[in-house]
Each structure stands twice: as structure tokens, then as C-alpha cells.
Image (cartoon, rainbow, N blue to C red):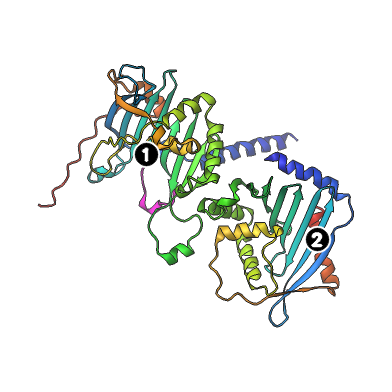
Amino acid sequence: MKEIFLLFFLHSVASRAQEPPRVTLERIVDGRGNRVCDVAKAELKAEGVRRTAWVVRGLVRSDLVLALETVGPASLHEIGFAGRPVLRLATRVPGGRVTATSPASEFRYFDVDLQRKTVRCNLSRLADETDVDLLAAAEEYGLLKQGLENGSAYVPEELPVVALLAAKKPLPHPSPPYRKSVPWTEGGPEADELAAAARAVIAR
Amino acid sequence: MRARGILLALWTVSAAMRAEAQSPDWFDAFRGRAFLQGDASFVVREKAAPPDSPPLFRARWVVLRYAGFTESERRWWPYRNLLLTTMPSGARYVLESSMGFLDENRLDEERPWQRVASERAAFEVWTSGTAGEASAAATLDAGPCEGMRQRVRAQGGTLTFLLDDLGTQTVRTALGEITAGTFDENERKDLVLLLRTSVDSNQALSTEFPAFHLRDPLLAVNVAFRDQAAPPESRTLAFAPDPSPTGDLASWRGLAHLPLDLPPFPAIVTESPVR
């Protein structure tokens, strides 16, 4: 499994020297138009490597970071809070065996078994080993997705959230609070700071 | 610089001691005076093989009881149901299905369940939690690790799993990697042969609970080598009484962790419901 991380590391070194990442900003608002949270999505493509970093600010106390790096069919996902340890999910091929790694231990599973208690139990343990607030943050994110008026299905960047939601299996919310995603184009320094945070994740 | 080296050495030793301390000792769960409740010797051959053909292996079935509770609770004393197998090559293995000392207030703590040991390695399955039935509402609220779960501890790795998931690709693959890292090629070949023993034998020590079946210790290899578990039609090896049993258990004392003194387990007298 170490080779897959080495592969990502070597490609990352090569891609860092490329042009700056493209960043898009979104604001999630409630039914009255009040801000719920902001999301910066940074993307960088270079030499067969695609790196994305999402920074979600305001949903929970700390910035929630979702990062994805793909090299050919292999992908490396990360979920965590800014400046804190991350939980990694790596696969060689889509639908293949997933290696989940916390700072303390590792567990490997097949996606087809994600709903089984063995996988859920081990994933929740790894999440807790990474950060005790991680499962709760994934649950908040899932609730946000449920209530999004113009929300879409989960995209690859959100795979760690899907995995942690499967692990925690929260009770379905009877009426998730209404949320709407709007473009955030006139952000000023606040937006610049969030965009910089997303760029910083990509440059790691 | 030298002080830093000493501190590093101390930290390394302390980390190793902590890791050791976190791994429970299987045999700690079997305390108190030990008794021998059952002892029988077998040879194992293909069902179709002539009775005078050389056995594929020999097996000695031994059930030990430990005085873990009061005399009145003797029926529930901890037990070790052991299958001591010897291959024609001389390689020996201990298969074990056991229940150690149980503290009802600490059911979430791990306790011994199944074990496969060779002369140089061991694959242990521990169990924790309870399998109690829960209401539908409680099941919805229950965490993913609630209920009874198993933990494999072996040189080749560790794994926490639920028995219901034993057939999943995730568990089978992980168990395969752990056994590959625990037993060498010859040991794996020997142990996989045990998977072909017929489990249709209902041979047991008792008709009352706990019955102690001959097939129980074989469950250990069926967990360890789940990926190679044989379908019922290919389980063509059968147990037959050994015409020349060895008698003494002394040669197994080290490998099977047998106590020096093993007096017979006194028969349990069933109380009459009418007094």
C-alpha cells in the first residue's frame, strides 16, 4: 500500500510547480438568505494529476477540508479539519479495495461491504482516532446536502463524507432545514482568505 | 546528545511495554485449579480409505475445566476444548474453542474464543460484547460497534469484525492476509487440510449444556482460513478411534499450555426439580 502513497507524493511534487489552482466560491444560505456556510473549491490539473480541495467554513466550529488527488484510476481522498490530522481513503481503481488510514491505524475494505457493520465499526474507529469531531462534522455535512434545494448527488470529492455517513448511519432527518447554494462573487477580504485556504490545501 | 539518546531508548522501551500491555494474554483467562473432563484419541483418514491405511494426521481431543467460580456453579466453569493434532511430518498444532473467566459486569471486555497455534505462531480470535436481542428502535440508535464482535490477534495482523460478516470480501481478504503473515507455507498447507474434516460428526462429551463437541475446535481453522473453507461435499476426512493412543499429555504441556496436574473433573449431579 505504501507504493500508492509514494505515487501520489511524486506526482504532487511535479504538479506543485504548475500554474495556480482555479478557485470557485459558493455561499450556502437558508430560506431567508442568511449565510449558513461558505465553500471554496480549488482545482489544479497538471501532468495527469488532478487535485481538488474544498474548504467548508462556518458549518462546524473549524474549517472542514475535503481533498482529492487522482492519478489515472487511482485516487486519494482526505477529510479533516484545517491544521488537524486527516483521515485518508486511497484506492487503486474505482470500486476497488479502499485503504482507510488514520494517524493511528489502517483498515482495508471493499466498497461493496460499506454498509456492513464490520466496515462501519472500523471506519468509525478510524474517524475517532483521527479527530473526535469528524463523524459529527460528516453528519452536519450530510444534513446540509439533504436540505439543499439545488443540491446534487454526492460527487467524488465528497466520498469521505459518504463513507463516514455509512459508518455512523444517522437517523434520517424528518424535515431537513432548507438550504440553497448561491455564487459568492463579491466576497472581499473574507472570500480572499477562504480562497487562499483552499489554495493552501492544494499546495500541501 | 547522549541524554537525548537515553531518552529515546527509554521512550522506545516504554512504547514497546505499552504495546505489550495492550495485548491481553490468552491464558490469563484460565485461572484456578484445572480438571480434565474429556480425553480421546483419533486418527483421521479419507472416509473411503481402508481402515489400515496410514492416517493423514492424528488428533487428541481434550477438554479442560478451570475452577473459576464456586462449586455450585461448576457447570459454568471456564473451559478449553482442545484438538491437539500431529501431522506425519511431526508438525503439531493446537486448535482451541474456549471460554475463559467471565465477569458479568465487564461483558464488553475481550475474552478468548478461538485459537490456532503452531510451534512458532498463533492466530487468536477474541470476542466481546453481548449478542442480546434489541428492540427495533434501539437497533436504529445503536452504534456500528454495538453487539457481539470478534477481534483477531496474530503475528500477521489484527482485525475487528462481526461474525455475521465472516463471508464478506472485506473480512475474507483480511483474514487471508493475516494467516499468510502468521503461518509459513507448510503450516498453512497442514491447517488447510483440517478444513476437510467432516463436521457431520455430532460427537460430544455430554448431552447437556455445555455439550463440548469434537467439531468446536475446528471452527478456529474455519475462521482463520475462511477464504479456503471447504464446501460440505469435499469434507471427506473422518475421525476414527486411535488404536494406539499415546496416553501421556506431557509432550503437549508447552505448546498447549497444559497445567502439570490434571485430576478428572467430577461428574455434575443434576438436581431433581422435586425436593
Residues B98 and B190: in front is B190
Say which residue appears at 52% left-offset and 53% top-offset: A116
- What chain is tagged by disc 2? A
Residues A135 and A20: in front is A20
Cβ atoms under marks 1 and 2 closer than 8 Å: no
Q: Position of residue A165 (x, y in %)?
A: 59, 61
Q: Position of residue A191 (x, y in %)?
A: 82, 70
Tell me the CA gap for discs 1 and 2: 56 Å
What residue sits right under mark 1 in the picture? Answer: B98
Q: Is residue A72 above or below residue A159?
A: above
Badge 1 crowding class, 10 Å Cα cut-off, few under 14, some 14 to 19, many 20 or more, is many
Residue A127 appears in the picture as rendered: yes
Magenta region, residue range: B99-109
Q: Residue furthest bottom?
A: A32
What residue sits right under mark 2 in the picture? Answer: A42
Q: Is residue B187 above or below residue B65?
A: above
Q: Which mark is residue B165?
A: none
The tally of labels here is: 2
Say which residue appears at 51% left-offset and 57% top-offset: B144
